[in-house]
Amino acid sequence: SFGLFNVVVAIFIENVLAGARANEQVMKKHRLRDQSFFATKMTELVAIIMKVHQDRQHEEANDGSDREVSSRSNLPATPQELLIEAAGVEITPALFEEVRQRDGVAEIFSDLALA
């Protein structure tokens, strides 16, 4: 009888965990369907990509010299301008890896169900 009780409890726990996983997936789908949420997260991601791209361009322009590179960002003011400028950026594996390591990117990927 004790063994039967353990089996029933194990099945109950398994069903609860499966339900929690399914609920989490449904919530992610709902968030992705929210166009405003998706647009905000994608704009954040594109801004980070552009910042990394600009930082890399500044580093290349300085050819490794000891001159300090300005940390000021020259990102476009509006999301539309940002997307237009970003359209010309090639995302190489090296650029993607550098973007992936930036603060906040893992959270954005998770929010977009990409992680």
Image (tube, helix red, strand yellow):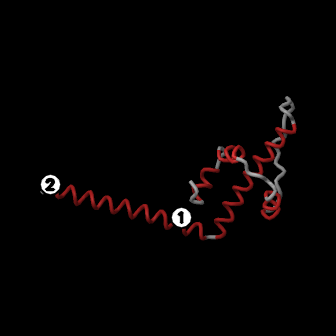
Quarter that holds the N terminus: bottom left
Res. 6 image quadrant: bottom left
The residue depicted at 64 percent of the width and 50 percent of the height is 104
Toward which corner of the image does residue 18 lie, by quadrant?
Answer: bottom left
Three-letter amino acid code of the residue under disc 1: Lys
Q: Which residue is mark 1?
A: 28
The percent position of residue 88, horizontal first and vertical second, equals: 81, 56
Q: How far, Cα to Cα, is label 2 from label 1?
A: 39 Å
Q: Residue furthest left?
A: 1
User: For the point 73% across and 56% down, which residue is it?
Assistant: 46
Q: Residue at x 41, y 62 (%)?
A: 20
The local secondary structure at tag 2 comes to: helix
Looking at the image, residue 27 sits to the left or right of residue 10; the answer is right
Dots 2, 1 in contact, CB < 8 A: no
Residue 68 numbered tag: none
Residue under circle 2?
2
**Is residue 38 shown left or right of residue 12?**
right
Other residues around mark 2 within 10 Å, as few (<14) / some (14–19) / many (≥20)? few
Q: First in sequence, mark 2 or 1: give its number.
A: 2
Question: What secondary structure is marked by label 1?
Answer: helix
